[in-house]
Amino acid sequence: MKIGFIGCGNMASAMIGGIIKNQVAVPEEILASAKSEATREKEAKNLGIRLTASNQEVAAFADVLILAIKPFYYQEVIAQIREDVKEDTVIVSITPGKTLEWLEEQFGKPMKIVRTMPNTPALVGEGISCICPGAGATQEDTNKVCEIFSGFGKTEIVEEPIIDVFVG
């Protein structure tokens, strides 16, 4: 399973660290993008993964694509990558406030989308993440996401109306 991360900030690096530490995936199966060269160099050294400046490269690489960016970048990044994402890729959002319906509208076509909400204890491998699959995501897709997120804590399947309050 190839896992892509668009964005490699604190939450993404914590997630990647847990995924590798708990042998959910090996570094060669993970590709992340980061805007700054300094972040790319730092995280390549810290995590042992390959990093790129190209969100499109990550989108084309991934079987599971985790959008680990700030909410205000979502529309711009999805516009960049929508043509590069394979139709069987599972798209995972980790941001509050962007609904499954909104995400699918941004891609402009049916996609396998899973909303998640990891919490800050993921930074020390003790997170609890809620998982909410969209209509296009199968049980197998949901299981993949749960497996990945188990690398840095526990998971719980929830209905979308409660996802934004789950962290609290």
Image (tube, grey):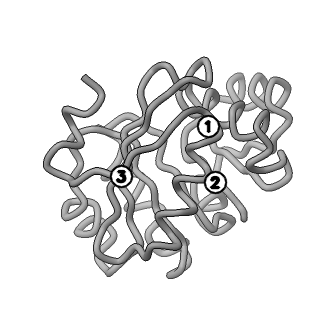
Q: Could you tell me which quadrant the N terminus lies in?
A: bottom right
Residue at image coords 52%, 73%: 140
Residue at image coords 46%, 62%: 91
Identify the residue position indicated by label 2 in the image: 4
In this rendering, the count of numbered labels is 3
Q: Is 151 on the left or on the right of 73, as rendered?
A: right
Q: Could you tell me which quadrant the C terminus lies in?
A: top left
Up-down relation of residue 43 to residue 20 (above or below): above
Q: Sequence order check: which comes first, mark 1 or mark 2?
A: 2
Query: Where does residue 45 sit, x and y in percent of width and height?
Result: 85, 26
User: Who is closer to the viewer here, 28 or 38?
Assistant: 28
Depth check, mark 1 against mark 2: the one in front is 2
Name which residue type carries label 1.
Ala
Name which residue type carries label 2.
Gly
Distance between the alpha carbons at the discs numbered 2 and 3: 22 Å
Query: Where does residue 15 sit, x and y in percent of width and height?
Result: 61, 34
Query: Where does residue 3 sit, x and y in percent of width and height?
Result: 66, 56
Q: Is 43 on the left or on the right of 6, as rendered?
A: right
Query: Where does residue 88 sit, x and y in percent of width and height?
Result: 53, 80
Identify the residue position indicated by label 3 in the image: 157
**SS at mark 3?**
strand
Q: Is 93 on the left or on the right of 48, as rendered?
A: left
Disc 2 residue crowd, few under 14, some 14–19, many 20+, Cα 10 Å: many
Q: Sequence order check: which comes first, mark 2 or mark 3?
A: 2
Residue at image coords 61%, 50%: 148
Q: Quadrant of residue 97?
A: top left
Distance between the alpha carbons at the discs numbered 1 and 2: 12 Å
Identify the residue position indicated by label 1 in the image: 34
Disc 3 residue crowd, few under 14, some 14–19, many 20+, Cα 10 Å: some
Distance between the alpha carbons at the discs numbered 1 and 3: 29 Å
Up-down relation of residue 75 to residue 57 (above or below): above
